[in-house]
Amino acid sequence: MANIKSAKKRILVINTRTERNKAIRSRVKTYVKKVYQCVEAGDKDAAAEALREATGELNKACSKGIYHKNTVSRKISRLAACVNKMA
C-alpha cells in the first residue's frame, strides 16, 4: 500500500476509472451482442436498428477514451458487413 498522500489518491482515482471503463465496455458488448442475435434470427430491420445503436455506443466509448479509434472503426466495419450480408 502507498504511504504518500498523492499516491493513495491516485489509487482511488484509478479504481474509480477502472469501474467506469468496465461498465462502459460491458454496455458496448451488450449492444454488439444484440446485433449478432438479430443477424442470427434473420431480422434485417431489427439488425439495422441494433447496428445503429451499437455504432452510437461504440463511438461514445471511443470519445471517452475506452477504446482506440481504430478498434472502434474495425468493430463497426465488421458489424456493418455482417448486417449488409443479410440482404
Image (tube, grey):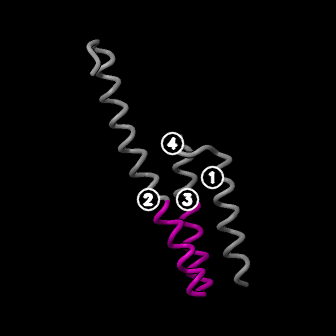
Q: Residue at x 72, y 76 (%)?
A: 84
In primary-sequence order, the first of circles 1 and 2 is 2
Q: Which mark is residue 60?
A: none
- Our reading of the magenta stretch's main secondary structure is helix
Instruction: Give the left or right position of residue 23, taking residue 39 as reference.
Output: left
Please tell me whether residue 69 is drawn above or below residue 6 in the rendered image. Answer: below
Crowd rating for badge 2 (residues with CA inside 10 Å; few <14, some 14–19, many 20+): some
Q: Which mark is residue 64?
A: 4
Marks 1 and 2 in Cβ contact (< 8 Å): no
Crowd rating for badge 4 (residues with CA inside 10 Å; few <14, some 14–19, many 20+): few
In front: 2, or 58?
2
Task: Determine the secondary structure under disc 3.
Answer: helix
Query: What residue would you read off at disc 2?
Result: 27
31 in the magenta segment: yes
Amino acid type, label 3: Gly
Residue 44 on image: x %, y % = 62, 84
Instruction: Give the left or right position of residue 65, taking residue 80 as reference.
Output: left
Task: Determine the secondary structure under disc 4.
Answer: loop
Query: What residue would you read off at disc 3?
Result: 56
Q: Residue at x 43, y 45 (%)?
A: 21
In primary-sequence order, the first of circles 3 and 2 is 2
Q: Residue at x 67, y 75 (%)?
A: 83
In the image, the segment drawn in magenta is 29-55
52 in the magenta segment: yes
Query: What residue would you read off at disc 1?
Result: 72
Residue 86 on image: x %, y % = 70, 83
Instruction: Give the left or right position of residue 48, taking residue 5 as reference.
Output: right
Residue 38, picture quadrant: bottom right
In front: 53, or 82?
82
